[in-house]
Amino acid sequence: MILCTSLLINGDREFCYKYDDTKKQYVQIEELPKYADMLTGDCVPVEQEALPERIPFEKLEEELRSAFAEDEDGYNMGISKYTPMELALPVFNLWEGLLDVRVKMPTGKYGMFELLEDYGVRMLTYGNASGGQYYGPYRSFLVSIDGNTEIFSIGITTYYPRTILCVAHDDEKTSHHALQMSVDEDAVAAGKTVKFYHNGRIAIGRIGSGKKSELREMVSRRYPKILTEGKYYLGSITADHLLRLDEPDVIDLVVNLISYSIVRDEFREIVKARK
């Protein structure tokens, strides 16, 4: 047996991993094994620390304001300090729920796709058409679309000065953000409820912007349930408690985000084929 290992170095620390063929994933190990140990597969796995408890609901705003006070630049955390609190606080609650790997989204058929596995949280990097880079945690979902296995990942981050919600798409062709929506511009707060919309803007690689009217026509055929006057309605959350990924409203939001992203990428492929 030959041990397959991977070594990551950031200039300050090093991280070593081995590939566990039974789990079909990499497992972190204490250090890079000696060559003889690689041949036998001997290594010491890193003991995983217990997951911290979630921030209590009544402490969420205090925690968020404290983080804002420490964040001098206003863009070093997932939620922008410049996002209005009536949006920032519910979205922070949602993001905490998406990062909680103890709670899984139920597998099964969800209209346009089948959820095969909730992959939990992964640290990922994605670029966009304008050259931006987005690195951070994403909640990833392994899905099947018409027999093709693909991964969609949802992240919440800062695009100064706004908070943005991103849906990334990985398949055999590409790895990119299929959707970036501004919480500040596209979400509407009413008390503790936030409704998420999207304006339909779409970038298509080096081609530039796609026609919103053509995208809308395609959505009307492929996923009409999200159509609303001039926009797309992607769902809502009522943040009067700690939000969880297995709740109907959160599931509905995730399903709509992934389904809308599927249609957007189908539209991109059609436009690219014309060129």
Image (tube, rainbow, N blue to C red):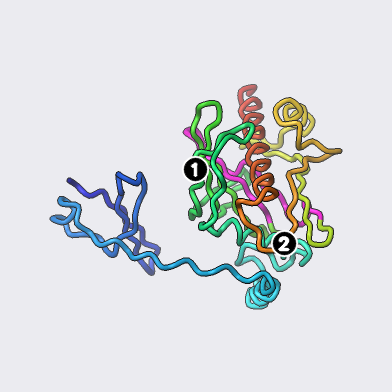
Q: Residue at x 15, y 51 (%)?
A: 40
Amino acid identity at mark 2: Pro
Q: Where is mark 1, residue-wise?
A: 117
> Which quadrant is the C terminus positioned in?
top right
Of all residues shown, which one is farthest toward the top?
A: 274
What is the magenta range? 164-188
- The image shows a total of numbered marks equal to 2
Residue 201 appears at what percent x and percent y? 74, 40
Q: Secondary structure at mark 1?
A: strand
In which image quadrant can residue 111 be found? top right
Between 94 and 242, which is closer to the camera in this rendering?
242
Between 199 and 250, which is closer to the camera in this rendering?
250
* Other-residue count near label 2 (Cα within 10 Å), few / some / many at <14 / 14–19 / ≥20: many
What kind of secondary structure does the magenta stretch mostly adopt? strand
Q: CA distance from mark 2 to mark 1?
A: 26 Å
Of all residues shown, which one is farthest toward the right?
A: 229
Q: Is residue 206 visible?
A: no
Residue 184 part of the magenta segment: yes
Residue 42 appears at what percent x and percent y? 19, 56
Residue 67 appears at what percent x and percent y? 64, 74
Q: Secondary structure at mark 2?
A: helix
Image height check: is 255 above or below 162? Answer: above
Residue 121 part of the magenta segment: no
* Other-residue count near label 1 (Cα within 10 Å), few / some / many at <14 / 14–19 / ≥20: some
Amino acid identity at mark 1: Glu
Q: Which mark is residue 50?
A: none
Q: Residue at x 75, y 50 (%)?
A: 236
187 left or right of 158? right
Q: Which mark is residue 90?
A: 2
Between 41 and 107, which is closer to the camera in this rendering?
107
Between 165 and 139, which is closer to the camera in this rendering?
139
Chain-order first, disc 2 or disc 1:
2
